[in-house]
Amino acid sequence: MRKKVTAYVGGLEVANQPLEIGIFDPRDDSAAIEWAKRKIEPYLSDRERAEATYRVEEY
């Protein structure tokens, strides 16, 4: 099973981060989101960070 975390701002996809599932329990999406935030958020503006929502999905 492969998953990715996608960041959305205002309903538009702004970034996605494939996950290395071996690091995470695939049932624990919150840990995966926190990991992806550290990878994605440096590229977002302050406004985008405040409005961002994250979704974990299989691909």
Image (cartoon, helix red, strand yellow):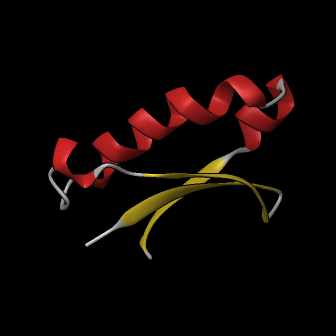
What is the count of numbered marks? Answer: 0
Location of residue 21 with respect to 41 vertically, above or below: below
> Looking at the image, which residue is at 75% across and 42% down?
51
Give residue 57's position: percent from left, percent from top: 44, 70
Location of residue 57 with respect to 31 vertically, above or below: below
In screen coordinates, is 27 left or right of 49?
left
Of residues 56 and 1, the one drawn nearer to the viewer in this rendering? 1
Give residue 52's position: percent from left, percent from top: 69, 45
Give residue 2's position: percent from left, percent from top: 33, 68
Figure quadrant of residue 58: bottom left
> Looking at the image, which residue is at 75% across and 29% down?
43
In screen coordinates, is 54 left or right of 52?
left
Location of residue 59 with respect to 11 vertically, above or below: below
Of residues 34 and 43, the one drawn nearer to the viewer in this rendering? 43
Give residue 44's position: percent from left, percent from top: 78, 31
In screen coordinates, is 31 left or right of 24?
right
